[in-house]
Image (cartoon, rainbow, N blue to C red):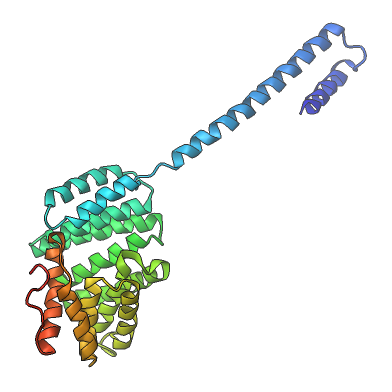
Amino acid sequence: MAGIYRRMIVNQENSLVGGKNMSAFMKLNMWRLEQKIMLFTYRIIAVACLTAPAFAQNVSVTALTTENQQKIELAVWKYAIDTPLLLNTIDWFRDLTRNSRESAAVAELSRLEFMRAQLELDKNRRIQLFENCIAIANQSLALNANDVRGLFWKAAAMGKMAEDSGIVHALRMIGPMENLLLKVVSLDEKYENAGAHRALGRIYHKLPGFPISFGSNQKALMHMKRAHELFPRDVITRAFYAELLYDVGRKEEARKHADFVLATPIADEDALEFSEYVDIALDVIKKTGGSEFNRVGNY
């Protein structure tokens, strides 16, 4: 770099006074100018080297710290018995993620809103809340189209909306739901206790087959089997699997899964949600000749 500036000075000397005839005073001033230019350039480089790490540190800030994730998990677990905790957590995390570019954090807000929607008794208001859940999931997916949480909770909210919206609206949602869940399976099949496999199994089991829709007991069995392989103690999977196996004529296997559901203690925090799955298991047991159990979980 010093050589470049010296050549600049020499060129200037030659063009102005023919080089050799320049006075000693003039040469001294030109040399001082050269030194000042070089010093200024080195300072610019030094400042750039110092500020680059500072900018990098700001990029790494995250809303989804371990502590924050634990707060979310607690609110989700207790959502049915501690509504104030859930609502306070939603308000807190909404503020925290207001300008977030972190797709996973925004998706967790969608998950929290999903829990709130499940508590709503008024159907129209419940549909609005699930629509809000989908909108937030879409924000997550706009930041990262492969965010597993955003994909899953969008599909889950669409499924709940389909239950409340009537058969025509529901059939329009089924195709997009299937695509979302298949994408979750391809990205992280274990997410939410293999929730995507479980949901796909349920969809394929309950939908009518061709030409009305794309229901398939073969596909249903494939996804339910995989969900059970990954999480053999999951009560929801075992209940759905029991009903599916009964419907395809595998009654002895169905009974084993139903018995497992009824033998599993249910925590108070899960009682509201799990009542549906206990009812499914009870129905399978009734159709297969009654139950050996005098006490059903916590019911």
Residue at 31 percent across and 56 percent down: it is: 107
Q: How many marks?
A: 0
Residue 202 falls in image quadrant: bottom left
Q: Position of residue 104 (x, y in %)?
A: 36, 54
Residues 250 and 178: in front is 250
Q: Position of residue 252 (x, y in %)?
A: 21, 89
Placement of 274 over or under 41, stated as above or below = below
Q: Position of residue 257 (x, y in %)?
A: 22, 80
Residue 258 falls in image quadrant: bottom left
**Residue 176 appears anywhere in the view:** no
| Residue 169 as seen in the image, left or right of residue 62 | left
Placement of 283 over or under 270, stated as above or below = below
| Residue 285 as seen in the image, left or right of residue 195 | left
The residue most toward the right is 20
Residue 43 falls in image quadrant: top right
| Residue 296 as seen in the image, left or right of residue 9 | left
Q: Position of residue 92 (x, y in %)?
A: 23, 43
**Residue 174 appears anywhere in the view:** yes
